[in-house]
Image: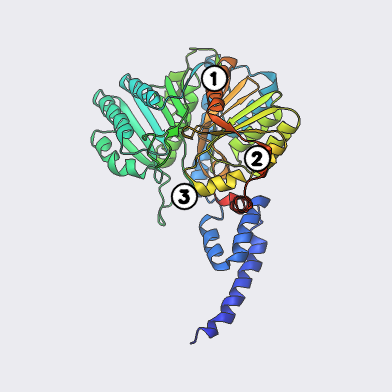
Amino acid sequence: MTPALFETPYYISEWIIRLVMLVYVPQRRASAATRTWLLLIFLLPWPGLIMYALFGRIRVPQLRREKQARASKDIRRTEAKLLAKRSVLGTVPPAYESASTLAYAMGDFEPFGGNRVELLDDYAASIARLIADLDGARHHAHLLFYIVEDDATGRSVADALLRAAARGVQCRVLIDAVGGEHGLARLAPRLRAAGIDVRAMLPVGVFRRSAGRFDLRNHRKIVVIDGLVGYTGSQNLADATFVVGYPNEELMARVTGPVVAQFEAVFLTDWSLETNQRLNLQELAAGIAVVGESVAQVLPSGPGYPRENTRDLFVALLYAAQKSVVITTPYFIPDEPFLQALRTAATRGVDVHLVVSKHANQPFSQFAQRAYYEDLLAVGVHIHLYRPRFLHAKHWSVDDQVAVLGTTNIDIRSFALNAEISLMVFDPAVVAELARVQARYFADSDLLDADEWGRRPFVAKVAQNMARLADSLL
């Protein structure tokens, strides 16, 4: 059969794909994602169809969804018992009560008072503090990380776990199967040989019943030690230079007090999802001890939940803001609800600052990110391009009253695809400490000028706008 005989059937098949997908793709999907996929499919029908089959729908195994739903019920029952025994329910400022209530409705955790929150913005010092806490562990150490590398940082934390295990401390470690592949291949065998239970999160594979799509990842960073000390933030267990180019700069929170029980609950839920072991929430009571003045609340998010939890919380905070919002994120590729809320806040007079890295570790994503700058500058958003390092930190401040930090980027991947964790803190003292970190960012950044940005080369504008068309794929 000559090649010419294939041309007509192939041409017909392309139009069948276009017409069928024109009906199928928009079902239960945001308009932006629909636009991206249909553009790809209309330009490249067969490659687009294959990509859509692989990535087009957020398919989480039904078993994982059912486990998540059961875990949510268990957490709420346990939380109610803890609150009945101890008066740790925190008081939230009236302007943010609706955001706090929304976080509870979507993520199961009430605001707990009596916490102490320390911000750690020195990369090496943060790891040293974590190792010191591990060396003081007496009962258990739970670690969950997206990336674990076999480098000086990864090995130093692994050595601390080995020392803890030798003292009889029960150590459990969760590492994302894709992001942490090096740690799983090279460090996990040493840890397992010492009796430390190490599990891969969201393993991929055609024949794994509980496996997810390989691009649905657990991006959380959580540490809980003895139920008394918790960590979360943007930092992985890897050297700052593990990505070639500018070294990472991070922000972590070291937390003590009742809210550590919420960290523990998130960890134990993920542990149950990966191991099929029944959720044991008895350990949560260990963290119920008043040690400070901060009211704090954890919000976990991910495709196992029925809604885009963190995106909805961020939108609520933007609409609640009265004076100021400062957002620090390494990746800024927002969906339309977030973008609209941000523009609305700036338009009604809120002093909005966006801090992003001047240097990219993902050039295509940065092209897409820059396509949003002109719209934001037009409504008065201040955009700071941080120079010294790749700013991988992810945090907010709102009105000098609320601080939010954790693992969530301002992009559709974090909102819809990854499992993430955010810590919301209602404490002016913590927000003031965060403001000092943000002031350092401002001082070491170039403030983007709207007129100058508008004069960027035409080729750059075209490239940025073309990259933005792929926002739902980034």
Depth check, mark 1 against mark 3: the one in front is 1
Q: Disc 1 residue type?
A: Arg
**Quarter-of-image position of residue 196:** top left
Residue identified by numbered label 1: 436
Q: Going 52% across and 63% down the picture, which residue do you hit?
A: 50
Q: Residues within 10 Å of mark 1 (few under 14, many from 20)?
A: few
Q: Residues within 10 Å of mark 3 (few under 14, many from 20)?
A: many
Residue 350 appears in view: yes
Q: Position of residue 273 (x, y in %)?
A: 44, 40
Q: Position of residue 264 (x, y in %)?
A: 45, 27
Say the numbered circle drawn on residue 212.
3
Assign a secondary structure to mark 1.
helix
**Quarter-of-image position of residue 161:** top left
- Spatial CA span between label 3 and label 2: 45 Å
Residue identified by numbered label 2: 452
Q: Disc 2 residue type?
A: Glu
Is 90 situated left or right of 273 in this image? right
Q: Disc 3 residue type?
A: Gly
Q: Are the residues flagged by discs 1 and 3 in contact, CB closer than 8 Å?
A: no
Say the numbered circle drawn on residue 292.
none
Q: Earlier in the sequence, mark 2 or mark 1?
A: 1
